[in-house]
Amino acid sequence: MTGGERMDNLLELKNIQTCFRMDGKDVRAVDGVSIYLKRGEIVGIVGESGSGKSVTMLSMLQLISTPGRVAGGEVHMEGVKGDFFKYKANSDQMREIRGGKISMIFQEPMTSLNPVLTIGYQIRESIMLHLKLNKEEARKKAVEILKMVNIPDAEERFDYYPQQFSGGMRQRIMIAMAMSSEPDVLIADEATTALDVTTQEQLLEMIRDVAKKTNTAVVIVTHNLGIVARYAERIYVMYSGSVVEMTDTLRTFKNPKHPYTRSLLRAIPRLNDPKDRVLIPIDGLPPNPATRPEYCPFYDRCEYRMDKCIAKGKPKLVEVEPDHFSSCCLTKEELEQKEIEIQNKEIHTAPIKTIKNELCLDIKDIKKYFAVYEGILHKKVGDIKAIEDITFQLRKGETLGIVGESGCGKTTLARSIMRVYKPDSGQVIFNGENIAEYKDKELKPFRPQMSMIFQDPFSSLDPRQTAGSVVGESLLVHKLVKNRVEYDAKVDELFRIVGLDPALKNRVAHEFSGGQRQRIGIARAISSNPSLIICDEPISALDVSIQAQIINLLEELQAKLGISYLFIAHDLAVVKHISDRILVMYLGRIVEIADCLDLYENTLHPYTKALLSAVPVADPEVEASRGRVQIKGEVPSIRKRPAGCPFHNRCPHAIERCKKEVPKLRTIGESHQVACFLYD
Amino acid sequence: MEGKENKMKSNKRIEKISKFIRLLFKRKIVVIGVIGVVFFTLLAILAPILSPYDPNKVDFAAYLTKPSMEHLLGTDMHGRDVFSRIIYGTRVSLIIGLLAVVIACAIGSVLGMVAGYFGGIIDDIITRFTEAIRAIPQIILAMALTAVFGGGIRNIAIILGISNVAAYIRMMRGQVYSVKEADYIMASKLQGVSNLGIMFKHILPNAISPIIVLMTQQVGGTILAESGLSFLGLGISAPTASWGTMVSEGRNFLLDNPVISLAPGICVALLVICLNMFGDGIRDALDPRLRGEL
Amino acid sequence: MGRYIAKRIGQMVLILFLISIFIFMLISFIPGDPVYAMLGEEVSPEMYAKVYHELNLDKPVIYRYFIWLGNALTGNFGQSTQFHMPTIELLAERMPVTLYFTFLSFFISIPVGVLLGVVSAVYRGKPIDTIVTLIANTTACLPQFWIGILLMYVFAMKLAWLPSFGFVWPWEDFGKSVQMTIMPLFCLAIGGISSIARQTRSSMLEVIRQDYIRTARSKGLKENKVIFIHALKNALIPVITLFGMRLGLLIGGSMFMETVFAIPGMGSLFVKAITSRDIPVVQACVLVTALIACLINLLTDILYAVVDPRIKFE
């Protein structure tokens, strides 16, 4: 196909192959991927780590550099003569395509803009290059676009530097920059992953609006199935460097044909799940491209596998229904047969736990401020009011979920309870004793009773310690074992409880995968027989298919050992799944506390409503029929918390009173508390 | 059971060491560096055996001769064999280089660790003090200290050690700060490990690799500094054979036997180059990224 | 920004204060009696007492320190025991020469070093990179004074192209000045060029890996623009830190240069002062050098703030 002709599709990628040279071997990150895009379409590409989704896009734009290289394939686009790969990466033709025809925005807003150039400069240079305008005209257009993406005071802020903007605003500037050169295609590569939920929604809405207005095609690359359910018209599912399934959004979720897609949908929690839904994780680890077998890469983890999967060799993408492609070699009948077998297997039931009436934690009015010092003499100039007026209870064996966006204070709260910080005032009554004022020495006997699981599996384990000694550290410190033999036995037992082979205990942290490291972290947390574990975003850094494994493990442990959890997360679907009660925080204050179902079905606080509305559900039908709550602005910085109700400047129901007074938590009904004047 | 575990542990250790050695020798340049360092070390240790003459033996008959079969590098203005003096000079350079770096590391690491871990006013004091030392150019500081305390191998080693301290304080402090905030430190604290325990069990092992790299890098610099001091007449004094002193001694006799001045300089350069390559190799071998740890 | 500068100035004053104490304390460690050192051992008891009193040796240490400090601040460093003239005059004579060499080599090594660093970073792995890196690494290992002697041997003695010592200001005799300056300048500059080149290279390599460079490329910008506008501006920031250090090393290196090539600068003065235990000159030189070094660091910090918008808008 020679270029310049009118094609059916705006953009076509054929059989892209990209290799990386590692340890002298060629590792195929992208193994024969073909994708097409029609004008004005919104397409989603979903996959986990190792799927090759981002690398495919970068390969298309020839942005891959050593040790990687594009090893094969073709790319054709309407309006471009010939195959992309015939041109050198640095040629005029490729550079015209980049930015001029295809624009890309990336994940990290904090590092994707050049910190020493003004944002105006960075937008303008793109316009001048691709639209061939002069400096004045380009500046005018740039300001126009900044206004379009809702940057206030665009004219003035043209000369600002990136660090003078928040994360959400920087992403909007990125979008402005990407769209300013009027491309035909916009690629959003995990563009909203690092943002707050409400900011994420605003940004995606804006991308959709702008794209529809200008008839620009959009490719959303993400691991979040909810996002593609809400925004994409067609979805590619990728696994281990290949496309395993492609069809329109509805059919992807309603009737997936590939075992991976099916298993994935079974493993993720959804916002509209019934409470007793059991997550069925995908066993095993994410694929390692270096050890990809000659047959289907999903075989080892596939519940539908049959002998013929190996015999058939490398799978090919086949049209199993009109406009529905799958690379699974099972026939329709075999698939359905396996499905029935799987459904009939051991019925997974949620582990049964008992919640006692005694309180594990009774938090009363705690407050924590951080002083801000400036100048040579370290003078105090103000306070960051991290958390205030925090009051709640946690019963024994219960899970209390804590949700909130950035700056809400959930981490400060967790650390105050764990007494990493000393609260400025209030009581922390743990198993009957108020430990808020205790000194380090007095806290020592309480240390074994509470522990913490951390978010980042990489920084939460000492890179120089063996897994065994990490897990066993508290056994030694608190003298929980009498001799070496007991120590070894206990460490082995802990490994088994969390599903790790005790033989691995002499390995060092970097020899484990992310999910395994979290298991080690969990083993460490339960090693001292705690009655309380604070889970600080324990799964957000893990692959989606692994998250379910850890969630299930935590639930099992709670049922078996009767531990109480404080579960901090920003993923509302996960929180709903695992919590009995949920506490919503905003800028350092509690806005709502309720039983799990009550919160979702009978939401009271305007912020909670906006939050829930912003979370996309991995079900396109539900998405299509949902009402949406509009919320303006971004989460303000904790340093600039508004007076009165912290939410009033974004709230659609704000009244005069909200600007001056802070609403107190009131109890509505049995156990639903909310801090809003609407319910006074 | 016990025996099997011990075997696993020692296997682990052997594995670690062999991996380290493999990474160390990955680049040809590093291999050359290692060979060079070993060569010079042997030279220093076996000096009495390897040098054909007594380095301090004066022989006025053989005054300022050019290189010949008898005297490979000729003789100097006192009739001493240059080649032997060069071999013995290796000792001076290596001893001072190593000693100074060990002193600097010991003092600097402790101060840096204390400053980083406790922060606050202790950190402020130590940092101000470090900045004051850094404000004076190293060589000038060394010269001033030499002026007061005099030269000689022991003094120069201590003086150069002190003038190098700042780099270790800053390095260790920086390491401690960055490690301090890691989640696993908090996890250990929450488990009740004491401050001292955390410093030794967690912070030190993680901070040690950059310190080792710094040490290997600094040996070369120290040797250069010592040769400079000796050249100026402030370091090692005659008649001890130090490469720097030799360059200075030979200055007035360049036309008679240029080798007196030129050869020692080449030796300094070679030794420092080899040490730097060795240091680069160690740095790469300890780099967690290259070891696949990140 | 103003606050930032004020803070830095405050720190500088504090550091200079600490240094002055250190220098003063140091002198008290010198073995031997200062009166004998000045006048010799053969001195009458009355003379001894007179000089003892003159030198304020009968007063407490702190008093002596402040007197010394006060004198120093007004430029009175006493008499040089070597040359028997006021130290400050000696410095006034010698310092310009040293500063001339120092700044000249500084301003030569910066553009050359940066350019070499950028080139070797951009063409990483290619022959030009290997050559530049090799030369830079090797020259950093050569003793400066030895390079000077080598040059002198080759160019002055064997080839007789250049004079082997002496100094003349360019406005006195331009041609001769150039001839006399070229070798010492080269020795001084080579160290700077190699270290700036290495730092620029590693800084550029670090910057090129950053996300915003990927963004710049994804906009289709010309590679030149990406390197010289987007990357270099960021990469130079850590290199600026080097400038301050460089100057310190240059001042140190000038001592070797001046000794080898017999140039009448502050460096050779300092060396002679040490060997002849000329205390006032030693103190003065160290203090002045520290002052210059601190000023340069201050200027570097200010330059930092001007160039890096992150500091302005912290």
Image: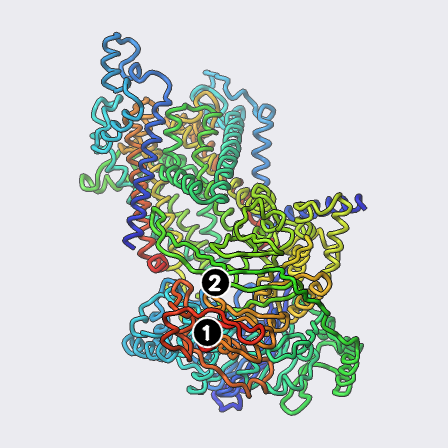
Label 1 element class: loop
Query: Residue at point 35% right, 31% down?
Result: C22
Estimate how packed mark 1 is, as few (under 14), some (14 to 19) or many (20 or more) residues with alpha carbons within 10 Å: many
Position of residue A278 measured from the top left corner of the image (x, y, whole percent): 69, 75
Position of residue B20 measured from the top left corner of the image (x, y, whole percent): 64, 47
Residue where numbered disc 1 is placed: A676
- Disc 1 marks which amino acid? Cys
Hey, which quadrant is residue B31 in on the image? top right
In this view, C299 is above or below A93: above
Q: Could you tell whether A347 is left or right of A608 in the image?
A: right
Dot 1 or dot 2: first in sequence order is: 2
Q: CB atoms at circles 1 and 2 under 8 Å apart?
A: no
In this view, A184 is above or below A124: below
In this view, A437 is above or below C294: below
- Seen as rendered, the residue at the extreme left is C172
Estimate how packed mark 2 is, as few (under 14), some (14 to 19) or many (20 or more) residues with alpha carbons within 10 Å: some
Position of residue A131 measured from the top left corner of the image (x, y, whole percent): 36, 80
Position of residue A116 measured from the top left corner of the image (x, y, whole percent): 36, 62
Hey, which quadrant is residue C118 in on the image? bottom left
- Chain hosting mark 2: A
In three-dimensional space, the C-alpha distance between marks 1 and 2, rounded to whole angstroms, equals: 14 Å
- Chain hosting mark 1: A
Q: Kindly indicate whether the residues beneath marks 1 and 2 are on one polypeptide chain.
A: yes
User: From the image, which quarter does the C terminus of chain B lie in?
Assistant: bottom right
Task: Work out whether residue A214 can be spotted.
Answer: yes
Task: Pick whichever, C189 or A37, lies toward us.
Answer: A37
Q: Could you tell whether C251 is left or right of A80 in the image?
A: left
Query: Residue at point 77% right, 50% down?
Result: A489
Q: Could you tell whether A393 is left or right of A555 in the image?
A: left
Residue where numbered disc 2 is placed: A389
- Disc 2 marks which amino acid? Asp
Query: Residue at point 70% right, 72% down?
Result: A282
